[in-house]
Image (spheres, rainbow, N blue to C red):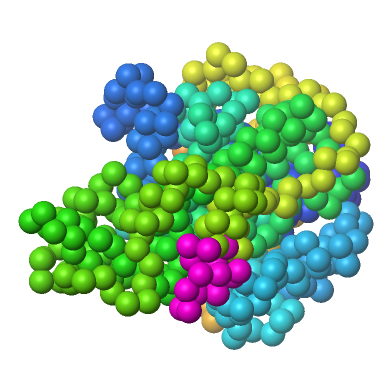
Amino acid sequence: MYNENDPESVELYSCAATLSDMEVFIFPQLMYSLFLANLMSKELWDWKLDPWFSKMNKMNAPRRIQRLKQYIMDHFSFNLDLDTWGLTDKKRELKRFSSFVNEQILSQSNALFGYEGDRYYFDIDIRRHFGLDKYTSDIIPYWKTETLEAMEAFRFKEGYTGGAGECVSLAALYAASAFAVADIPLDNIYMLATPLHSQNFLDIGNGIITNNRRIVTKKMWFNGTELSAKARRALENERVTIIAHRTGYIHTMYDEASISKEKYDHFSNKLNSFLKTEINYEILANFLRQNNKLQQCFQITHKCCGKPRYIEAEKVYHYEHSSKARVGDQTQNILLHEIEEDEYYTEPLKNRILLSELENFFNENKALEDNSEIIDKLGKYLNRDCLNVDNVIHDLIKFCNTVPRLPSSEKKFIEVEPVDLDGVSSSQDVIRRLEELRHVNKTADLAFSAFRDLSRSPVKPFLKAAFERNPVSVFGLKNSNINQIYDQLCKITNESIYSESTRVAQPDEVYNYNRGDGLEKALLFINILKNRFTEEPVSIECKNNSVLSVTFKDNSYCFETKKTVDIDSVNRNI
């Protein structure tokens, strides 16, 4: 557990306070620690009091997740703005992590240090995609993940009307709310991270994947829509680097894994099953929906007034945008009826394949993607001048069977005490249970640092994070002198984003949300001083129960506080 005399231990626990994407990658237990920090939040459990969730006990698990999805969609936006948490550089971060991980392995595995995934990510120019093209290749973003309270506090930030968060934050929020609000068993929740994305797999029925604010069922995975295509990108184009579960984690980069081998095998089988479907007429129609350039090789027939009529497939797919009906399923005829009769032709269109013939073909053959004889027959149906049959068959099989690149199971599995939250019904229950567990489970212990509770976590790592990895406030106030900065801090709302008296925000949270308790303002002020005047001493003391005094160059700057943190400990570690 934590050892303040061990620099590596201090670094690990400081990373639990900042929770940047790169830190979660280096220390995979932090992913689940953030999830547990959200479960300790009273704000999360208060969601259950919202009328939106009043009838959850009458819903089955998939409907509860759908209900939860809509709540998250309504209250949170996806945010990956580079300016929110600021920038650092590769040299600085590689030096920080040099004792934990090999630089070459890191550059091959993490997007921030050079890894760009498969060809897809080179094609989209990954640095331009994320807005990094205006900086040198050595500049990388912090992209800190947020606790629930920090996500909700985005409503105080200019340009936002509600909460927000990046993909790891949303994954941790989904996982925590699935357990606390939707009553999904902890054992059924798996968190996944790829070099460029984070999501969850909920082991419910055929499975559900959470993807940023949305969810994806197995049926949705194969429906061929643009949203589903985006949801598929990470598992189609990237390796899965981390799987986190209540029993532990497995990481593609490390030889040891703490997740239960039995649970990991179960997860692997369920995920592979989720990502695979048989080829039938509906799936073929979905495949064409996603690969719209192929639609011009097909036509659809429709009986009107007792006579067959014909129409270009691409026209019918276009009509889907204004209809709830779809090509390929039981609603197809409804869609065809919605199209004006003058759009149809009385004779079949030349050089176009009739989808009705393919529908009959699948009804007769019940094709599966691993049935080579059926695939060969299908190829003959698709053999037209406008199609490259081999490419189409290859892409169709790939569409029907995503093979995830999971961490190898050839690891040394280390047994650890699993996280057990059976029977908890409140944030206080979770805190009590994790207090019992933290001495035998480091992930649980780190969760208190992620929770930012300085009465239950070490102060030194928190301050290390505050003064080393909060560049936004330093940059944003660079043109103001010390007295001007102090005046500005005195004017902003004197209220923390964390309601508990022992939980403390980091300086850039105070700056971004334009609010903070006096202690948090004082730490922001000290962050500025330590970055500008690296050799000058600075100290903080408690003048009485509600006033803190920061001393710098014989001047005192006072801040009113409601936090009940050990200020002597803070002062010793500045």
Q: 34 left or right of 51?
A: right
Residue lying at 66% horizontally and 20% vertically, measured from the top left? 420
- Would residue 455 be found to the left or right of residue 380 on screen? right
- Residue 215 lies within the magenta run: no
Give the percent coordinates (x, y) of residue 26. 78, 53
Q: Nearer the viewer, residue 70 or 300?
A: 300
Q: Nearer the viewer, residue 550 or 132?
A: 132
Residue 335 picture quarter: bottom left
Q: Quadrant of the N terminus?
A: top right
Give how far across and how far down residue 293 sits, in percent. Answer: 43, 74
Which residue is the extreme one toward the left?
305
Q: What percent of the width, then of the height, locates residue 202?
A: 55, 35
Residue 439 seen in the figure: no
Residue 348 visible, this angle: yes
Q: Which residues are magenta?
A: 380-393
Relative height, residue 343 to residue 74 (above, below):
below
